[in-house]
């Protein structure tokens, strides 16, 4: 029969072994990736519709490799070990095609465009005809544009965007005639 203390020891040991095995699996997974996979993940970006020159990829990859690894990575091996989904295509003139790796870019995707700025809220109480005649009558009484704007604000009227009247928007309203 197992005591509660012994059960707790066994559970703790199982948790420790589980963590160790997870660490070993992660290490093995990292080692199963080729140097080419590691280079592509670190220095290039997968982007549909883009290509990079195979010669540029090969030169940069060879320069990145540790000295002892460089001899074992021929162009043929690099072509064979390209990660799944990356293809060699020929671009350029038919008499001098250039080998390109499809699906890669040296640059990340650009950020998405910013959403359009919202329009200023409309003033639901704005009645251009009514306000024109109010302002026009004030003008007929001899008031200047800045005085009309101040009076419109005192009466609680706002322009079409809901802002207080100023000389510029009052003048624009009066030009409607």
Image (cartoon, rainbow, N blue to C red):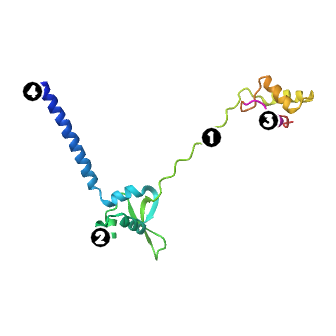
The local secondary structure at tag 2 comes to loop
User: Which circle's residue, 3 or 1, is located before the other in the chain?
Assistant: 1
Q: Nearer the viewer, mark 3 or mark 4?
A: 4
| Corner quadrant of residue 128 | top right
Q: Which residue is the site of mark 1? A: 117
Residue 112: x %, y % from top left: 53, 47
Q: Which class describes the residues within 10 Å of circle 2: few (<14), some (14-19), or many (20+)?
A: few
- Residue closer to the observer: 151 or 4: 4
Residue 168: x %, y % from top left: 80, 37
Label disc, if present, on residue 2 of the rendered structure: 4
| Residue pictured at 89% horizontal, 31% vertical | 144
The local secondary structure at tag 4 comes to loop
- Judge whether residue 110 can be spotted in this image: yes
Q: Nearer the viewer, mark 1 or mark 2?
A: 2
Give the Cα separation between the discs numbered 4 and 2: 59 Å
User: Which circle's residue, 3 or 4, is located before the other in the chain?
Assistant: 4
| Residue pictured at 78% horizontal, 26% vertical | 153
Residue 65: x %, y % from top left: 34, 64
Give the Cα separation between the discs numbered 3 and 4: 88 Å
Q: Which class describes the residues within 10 Å of circle 4: few (<14), some (14-19), or many (20+)?
A: few
Give the Cα separation between the discs numbered 1 and 4: 69 Å
Q: Nearer the viewer, mark 3 or mark 2?
A: 2
- Residue closer to the observer: 174 or 15: 15
Q: Which residue is the site of mark 3? A: 169
- Residue closer to the observer: 89 or 64: 64
Give the Cα separation between the discs numbered 3 and 1: 22 Å
In the image, taking residue 145 as reference, residue 58 lies left or right, namely left
User: Which circle's residue, 1 or 2, is located before the other in the chain?
Assistant: 2
């Amino acid at each position: 029969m197992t005591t509660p203390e012994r059960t707790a020891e066994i559970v703790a040991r199982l948790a420790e072994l589980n963590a160790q095995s997870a660490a070993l699996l992660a290490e093995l997974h990292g080692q199963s990736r080729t140097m080419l996979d590691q280079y592509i993940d670190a220095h290039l970006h997968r982007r549909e519709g883009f290509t990079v020159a195979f010669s540029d990829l090969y030169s940069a990859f060879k320069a990145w490799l540790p000295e002892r690894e460089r001899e074992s990575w021929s162009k043929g091996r690099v072509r064979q070990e390209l990660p799944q989904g990356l293809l060699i295509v020929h671009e350029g003139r038919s008499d001098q095609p250039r080998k390109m790796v499809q699906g890669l870019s040296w640059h990340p995707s650009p950020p998405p465009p910013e959403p359009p700025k919202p329009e200023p809220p409309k003033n639901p109480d704005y009645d251009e005809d009514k306000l024109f005649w109010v302002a026009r009558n004030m003008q007929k009484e001899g008031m200047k544009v800045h005085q009309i704007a101040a009076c419109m604000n005192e009466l609680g009227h706002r322009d079409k965007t809901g802002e207080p009247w100023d000389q510029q928007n009052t003048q624009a309203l009066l030009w409607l005639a």
